Image (tube, helix red, strand yellow):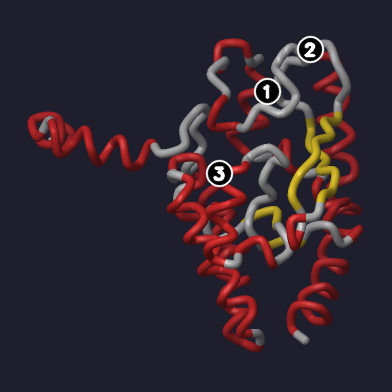
């Protein structure tokens, strides 16, 4: 009942309000993208939907058109190729705004595991272990506010599984957890938490570096 009625109803209502409120800013962003670099304003990509079906995600284009189409964020190593405006779009997550239309259509929700690329077999397989492929993907989620690009794939999948279990419980607990993820996203975006190009697993690498080089940890503490 919560997933299919209340949560879906809230997705429709909030997406309509957001689209109307952000129509002008999104139009301005689209114009700037066209003026900023060659290529279309919108970027379409094949992603994994609920139960490992497929859908087309919409984003503002925040990379040069020369970048391979299905490159995962954590494999992108060309930060120097980005224009200042493209960097701004990615750091503030404004490139995700067109996904409001995906939410309205019902292929996404406001809160859920971030939709994997169709070719991210490692992430899809890990999510299978935790049942995270059996809930609708979201604009933001539990993993997004707990590390985002910095998380290794097994950790990210485990967090997505935690969200899936909470959601399947339904009721006020599921609603409270959705609210926690939703409002926690604003704080994460303001801090730019977890936004690291080519950055999957950097939290683990930072922890390893600290244990191997304690003098660096002490220096950082100062």
Q: Is residue 28 left or right of residue 89?
A: right
* Residue 188 can be seen, yes or no: yes
Q: Describe the element under mark 3 as helix, strand or loop.
A: helix
Which of pointers 2 and 1 lies earlier in the amino acid sequence? 2
The crowd level at tag 2 (other Cα within 10 Å; few <14, some 14-19, many 20+) is some
Q: Residue at x 63, y 28 (%)?
A: 88
Q: Which mark is residue 122?
A: 3
Position in image of residue 104 (x %, y %): 89, 59
C-alpha separation, residue under disc 3 versus residue under disc 1? 28 Å
In this rendering, the label closer to the viewer, 3 or 1 = 3
Q: Residue at x 61, y 80 (%)?
A: 174
Q: Describe the element under mark 2 as helix, strand or loop.
A: loop
Q: Quadrant of the N terminus?
A: bottom right
* Residue 17 can be seen, yes or no: no
Q: Which mark is residue 16?
A: none
Position in image of residue 179 (x %, y %): 61, 71
C-alpha separation, residue under disc 2 versus residue under disc 1? 9 Å
Q: Which mark is residue 86?
A: 1
Seen in the picture, residue 218 relative to 177 is either above or below; the reply is above
Disc 2 and disc 1 in contact, CB within 8 angstroms? yes
Position in image of residue 116 (x %, y %): 67, 46
Q: Quadrant of residue 17?
A: bottom right
Q: Quadrant of the C terminus?
A: top left
Q: Quadrant of residue 31?
A: top right
The crowd level at tag 3 (other Cα within 10 Å; few <14, some 14-19, many 20+) is few
Q: Describe the element under mark 1 as helix, strand or loop.
A: helix
| Residue pointed to by mark 2 | 37
Is 167 or 70 nearer to us in this picture?
70
């Amino acid at each position: 009942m919560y997933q299919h009625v209340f949560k879906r109803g809230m997705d429709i209502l909030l997406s309509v309000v957001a689209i109307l409120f952000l129509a002008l800013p999104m139009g301005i962003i689209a114009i700037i993208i066209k003026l900023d670099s060659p290529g279309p304003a919108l970027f379409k990509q094949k992603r994994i939907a609920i139960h490992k079906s497929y859908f087309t995600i919409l984003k503002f284009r925040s990379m040069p058109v020369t970048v391979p189409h299905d490159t995962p964020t954590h494999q992108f190593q060309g930060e120097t190729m980005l224009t200042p405006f493209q960097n701004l779009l990615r750091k503030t997550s404004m490139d995700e705004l067109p996904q409001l239309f995906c939410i309205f259509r019902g292929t996404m929700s406001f809160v859920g595991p971030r939709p994997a690329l169709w070719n991210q077999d490692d992430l899809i397989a890990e999510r299978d272990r935790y049942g995270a492929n059996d809930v609708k993907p979201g604009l933001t989620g539990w993993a997004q506010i707990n590390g985002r690009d910095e998380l290794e794939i097994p950790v990210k999948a485990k967090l997505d599984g935690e969200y899936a279990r909470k959601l399947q419980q339904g009721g006020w607990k599921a609603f409270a957890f959705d609210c926690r993820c939703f409002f926690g996203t604003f704080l994460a975006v303001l801090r730019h938490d977890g936004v690291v190009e080519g950055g999957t697993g950097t939290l683990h690498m930072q922890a390893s570096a600290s244990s191997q080089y304690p003098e660096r940890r002490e220096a950082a503490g100062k």
